[in-house]
Image (spheres, helix red, strand yellow):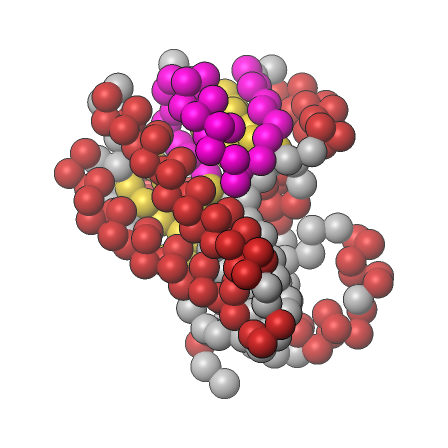
Amino acid sequence: MRKKTLITGAGRGIGEQIALKFGSEKHDLTLLIQKKEQYPNIMKKLKKYNIKVDCFIGDLKNQKFLNFLSKKVNKIDNLINNAALANTKHFLKVTHKELDDITNVNLKTIFKLSQIFSKKMIKNKIKGNIINISSQLGHVGGYNRTGYCMTKFGLEGLTKSMAMDLGKYGIRVNTVAPTKTIVNQEERQKTKKRLNLIRNKIPLRKFSTTKEIASIVYFLTTESSSSITGTSIISDGGWTAGK
């Protein structure tokens, strides 16, 4: 029987590449996307894999949408919490609404979805996986990233505690923490100077790629990683190794 994987933020970037990787490995997919215009693109790219794909469009900050998913999706083997908000404002300029939004998407929604679907794994006796897409900024601080760092550091702690609570059910919980990842070529052209500055801070002098991150995520769902839980795979080119 095919395994079923649910991926949030699957409409673009890392999330889309994760969907393509799991599709190529013949997983049936449940995809959560934010914008309806993302739907035809991802469905077209997945068509060649001849798998079952359910795609739901909604706002992860909306509890009604989460309730809908709980009723609609009965069984999964893997939950990939990829969706996230960024915030690049100085600490003194982050608004309360921005703080609420980034906390809701980057932490609270992950908590809620993980709780919903770990209960379903336990009910169906599935020794599944929950993989949270974190960041190198869940391990080190950064200028103008207070809201983002707060949520990613929190996500690392949540992941460790979830792994301890869910280990007895055979459910593994891990994070993947990339460095800067180029998700479209337009960004490469428009912010060339900024990207060069960032690259020069990375010991390997290279960014993460969406394909690299997707492959690491897939690895964490395989038998080869069956003893890995409660930890983070940091794909940062050495950024967090030291100065």
x and y percentages locating residue 123 in the rendered image? 23, 21
Image quadrant where one finds the N terminus: top left
Residue at (43% x, 26% y) in the render: 67
- Answer left or right for 184 relative to 109: right
Q: Is residue 70 magenta?
A: yes
Residue 70, image quadrant = top left
Residue at (46% x, 39% y) in the render: 80
Is residue 228 at least partly visible in the picture? no
Q: Is residue 168 magenta?
A: no
- Answer left or right for 109 relative to 129: right
Q: What range is drawn magenta here?
A: 52-80
Residue at (19% x, 44% y) in the render: 165
Residue 2, image quadrant = top left
x and y percentages locating residue 139 in the rendered image? 42, 68
Q: 50 or 115, which is in the foreground? A: 115
Is residue 168 at least partly visible in the picture? yes
Above or below: residue 141 compared with residue 220: below
Q: 232 or 238, which is in the foreground? A: 232
Residue at (52% x, 40% y) in the render: 61
x and y percentages locating residue 242 in the rendered image? 45, 81
x and y percentages locating residue 68 in the rendered image? 47, 22
Residue 221, image quadrant = top left
- Answer left or right for 157 relative to 180: left
Instruction: Point out the residue furthest to the bottom here.
Output: 243
